[in-house]
Amino acid sequence: MSGTETLVEMRHIEKFYGRVHALRDVNLTIRRGEIVGLLGDNGAGKSTLIKVLSGAVPYTSGQIFIKGREVRLRSTNDAIVSGIETIYQDSALVPQLSIARNLFLGRELRTGPRFLDRLDQERMNAVAADLLKRVGISKNIPPTTPIGSLSGGERQAVAIARAMYFDSDLIVLDEPTNNLGVAETQGVLRFVREARDTGHSCIFIAHNIHHVFQVVDRMVVMRRGSVVADDLSPATSSIQEVENIITGEHMAA
Ligand SMILES: Nc1ncnc2c1ncn2[C@@H]1O[C@H](COP(=O)(O)OP(=O)(O)O)[C@@H](O)[C@H]1O
Ligand SMILES: [Mg+2]
């Protein structure tokens, strides 16, 4: 399914948090339509890498290219404009607001004369209802429901629906299945597959290596700030082999 067009290229990325050397000469390429699993022990640098890519933290040095053009991401908005949408475990959803309002947060649809600045609530609700169906929320949840009353998996679905609606080229999921039940986890994995089927690329970080094996095309492993493998395939590598690379066991032999 993965094309050959390079969507994102990170070159020689270095990141220091004070004295902590969190990213060491990291190179990462993501092609269009590719689902990439990012693996590594706690503290390996996974979240830092995707925060750099989503404009949430500044990097110390290196270059980032998106669709062949060098970009300097100074904010999460810069990344979103470049087509990169990141979904954290506690995504930037506002519990008191409705599903529909959360979907359009910061990008609300408007109606009537510009100076009245009136929200097009009706159209946002209609789009939201349609999206909820598409991402597989089969229960009949009205789009006016506050996010606060949804389960963890349903919230993930809303965040993914948002990335799909705004047609992000790359959807980044940092541990989206943590604290989710079995059915909800299956839901998130199904959305990742659907994202690929609709031509989106995805970076998927998960603790549970079995979940990663179920959905990704390729795996990248980080250890102590460095990328130590970037072309592992779930079709040709075993879970044990990948676990050994994550822990560095394979070096001992
Ligand atoms: N805001 C921060 N300030 C200082 N050190 C940080 C910060 N965030 C992460 N680190 C450190 O950077 C390293 C990589 O962390 P992180 O990217 O969160 O790893 P992972 O997501 O793989 O668990 C760790 O040593 C961590 O302690
Ligand atoms: Mg992390």
Image (cartoon, rainbow, N blue to C red):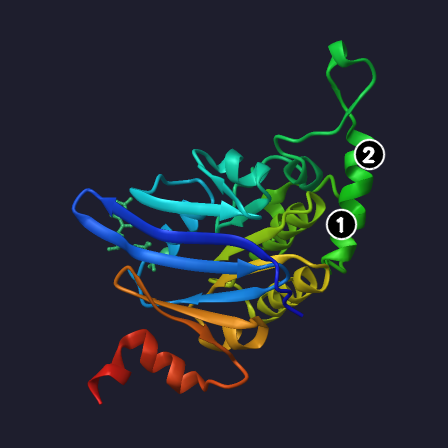
For the C terminus, the image quarter is: bottom left
Q: Position of residue 238 (x, y in %)?
A: 45, 87
Task: Say which quarter of the image contains residue 165.
Answer: top right
For the residues labelled 1 and 2, say whether their Cβ atoms are less than 8 Å apart.
no
Q: CA distance from mark 1 to mark 2?
A: 12 Å
For the residue with label 1, is its CB less than 8 Å from the closest atom of ligand 2?
no
* Residue 175, visible in the rendered structure: no
Q: Position of residue 64 (x, y in %)?
A: 44, 46
The residue labelled by disc 2 is: 123
Q: Which residue appears at 58% of the width and 44% of the height?
A: 148
Mark 1 element type: helix
The residue labelled by disc 1 is: 131
Circle 2 packing at 10 Å, graded few (<14), some (14-19), many (20+), is some
Q: Position of residue 117 (x, y in %)?
A: 73, 16
Q: Which residue appears at 58% of the width and 72% of the height?
A: 215
Q: Using residue 36 as the reference point, say whether residue 124 is left or right of it.
A: right
Task: Tell me which amino acid carries mark 1.
Answer: Leu
Q: Residue furthest bottom?
A: 253
Camera-side residue: 62 or 154? 62
Q: Position of residue 216 (x, y in %)?
A: 56, 71
